[in-house]
Image (spheres, rainbow, N blue to C red):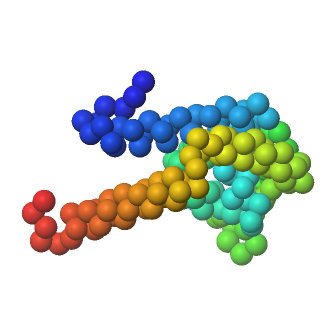
Amino acid sequence: MRPDTGNELVDAILHAAHRVRTAADADLREGGLSLPGFKLLKALSQQDRSMREVSDILHLAPRTVTDIIDGLQARGLVVRHPHPSDRRITLLHLTEAGADRLTSATTAADRARDAAISGLDDDERATLRRLLARVGVARAAVSATSGAPGHTG
């Protein structure tokens, strides 16, 4: 079902983003990972991270991150270990099995990404990239202005 924000263009952007995410998630699930699980493994491939860092990177609630990590840990893809200097922090580490799963899942993610834009030629892709960048900048500017002290909105 298409979103209905009252703005046809915003609805089209949201609908396209939802379809891309849904397709990527479906392709990844065939290989045994969800899209959030894939993103988590990808974040850990760069370095060990705290639960809070992962929550911030994925833009998910800590409880949701805990559930994802529990599932990945049960499958031997991630392990928890104490922070070397702050015992209050638990770090997450990508196991060798997790790195292997990430490598195979990256193929599925790449396939979904490429399929999402396969109907666009190079010029259309460049135009879409520029337009979406402007939409993002415009939204950030509006947020900054509306949050400014003395703004009466």
When the figure is inspected, residue 81 is found, relative to residue 101, above or below; the finding is: below
Q: Residue 5's spot in the image, x, y percent?
A: 29, 36
User: How many numbered markers are drawn?
Assistant: 0
Is residue 27 found left or right of 118 in the rendered image?
right
Residue 119 occupies quadrant: top right
Question: In the image, residue 77 lies at what x, y percent?
Answer: 82, 47
Pick whichever, 99 or 80, lies toward us.
99
Residue beneath the point at 32% across and 59% down: 139
Above or below, comparing residue 133 to residue 25 in the picture: below
Q: Is residue 90 visible?
A: no
Residue 86 appears at what percent x and percent y? Answer: 67, 71
Q: At 76% from the left edge and 72% from the top edge, which residue is drawn?
A: 84
Q: Residue 40 location, x and y as percent?
A: 68, 51
Seen from the viewer's position, the closer of residues 75 and 14 is 14
Q: Is residue 134 left or right of residue 126?
A: left
| Residue that appears at 80% across and 56% down | 94
Determine which quarter of the picture holds residue 93: bottom right
Q: Quadrant of the C terminus?
A: bottom left
Residue in the picture at 49% in, 42% down: 17
Name the quarter where the N terminus is drawn: top left
